[in-house]
Amino acid sequence: MNEEKQTEISELGEFGLIDRLTEGITHVNPQTVKGVGDDAAVIDAQNEEVLVTTDLLLEGIHFDLTYVPLQHLGYKSAVVNFSDVYAMNGTPRQITVSLGISKRFTVEHMEMLYAGIRHACQVYGVDLVGGDTTSSRQGLVISITCIGTAPKDKIVYRDGAKDTDLICVSGDLGAAYMGLQLLEREKAASVGVKDFQPKFEGKEYLVERQLKPEARKDIVKMLADNGIKPTSMMDVSDGLSSELLHICKASHTGCRVYEDRIPIDYQTAIMAEELGMNLVTAAMNGGEDYELLFTVPLTDHEKIEKMEGVKVIGYITKEDLGCALMTRDGNEIPIKAQGFNHMA
């Protein structure tokens, strides 16, 4: 955190801080009638369904400011909410941002955090319309609520997967988890070392996937452009294994996923080898990839095969067959929810 020319938050007070952080905000969505500056935001839902999602991020649990820049943290905090709306086949429209701030933070620190949030809003076309601030005794607390919309006939839930549906995933998996392992390794190496320089050469992709993930707005658009409505969909936030089990439980189905079809980036594989970690375990259970996991009818196979950045990794089965990973040597391993557990 930059310590130059810092201003104590107490000098501005709660409302002065809000005014400073939200100065110059403009709205891009016609549904936004009223944003920051009144007792409540006003949003015109028109004839679409409204989607609402909230994420709570706690310092020491969800992020470590030793290696997470505040601007990146702000960007990520917003994007992970956008991802939840895209996972419903919707479009994020507005967010509210609430902060719990301890005394070690200054106005300039919060401006850096808000710079990241506002940049994310600009990139994804989302309006920041309100929130709250309060003091915190536990470091920094960030709560963001995202409001999105979707036509009634376009919303995709978790519970629509059917027997023989194809299981698809966007991008690659495990990179964000390996980025976290790399950051933690360098943090440990820096203890007691003056002017420490972390070693990220050749692994920049992993660091970016952890610190600055992107929501897959492009995949949602590609699906629509190709006339594909998934039967179920989730974003991969807690790990592929956990998300697969969520879909199968909600849909009353089983699944088969092929080990050799799980998309993994080269840098992820190299990092796993360096750390002596099982690559497939990292890809299945790492989490924070924010890729889209979705199912489509078998009849959409040709369309899916032509979509860049999407891979078919398995298929949905009847519920009594359970959920299993098909290994390279033909064995079946039961899939267990070993992804991130927020209450562990």
Image (cartoon, rainbow, N blue to C red):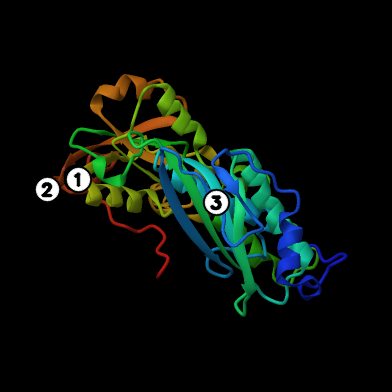
Quadrant containing the C terminus is bottom left
Of residues 61 and 99, the one nearer the viewer is 99
Quadrant containing the N terminus is bottom right
Residue at 19%, 45% (x, y): give it: 253
Residue reaching furthest to the left: 320
User: Left or right: 208 with respect to 291?
Assistant: right
Amino acid carrying mark 1 in the image: Gly
Q: In this view, does 70 lie above or below 307?
A: below
Kindly identify which residue carries mark 3. Answer: 42
User: Left or right: 319 with respect to 248?
Assistant: left
Residue 254: give its label. Answer: 1
In x, y percent, where is residue 101?
66, 71
Kindly identify which residue carries mark 2. Answer: 320
* Badge nearest the viewer, 1 or 3: 3
Residue at 38%, 39% (x, y): give it: 262
- Distance from disc 2 to disc 3, alpha carbons, whole Å, reads 47 Å
Give the SS element for disc 1: strand
Hey, which quadrant is residue 41 in on the image? bottom right
Of mark 1 and mark 3, the one earlier in the sequence is 3
* Badge nearest the viewer, 2 or 3: 3
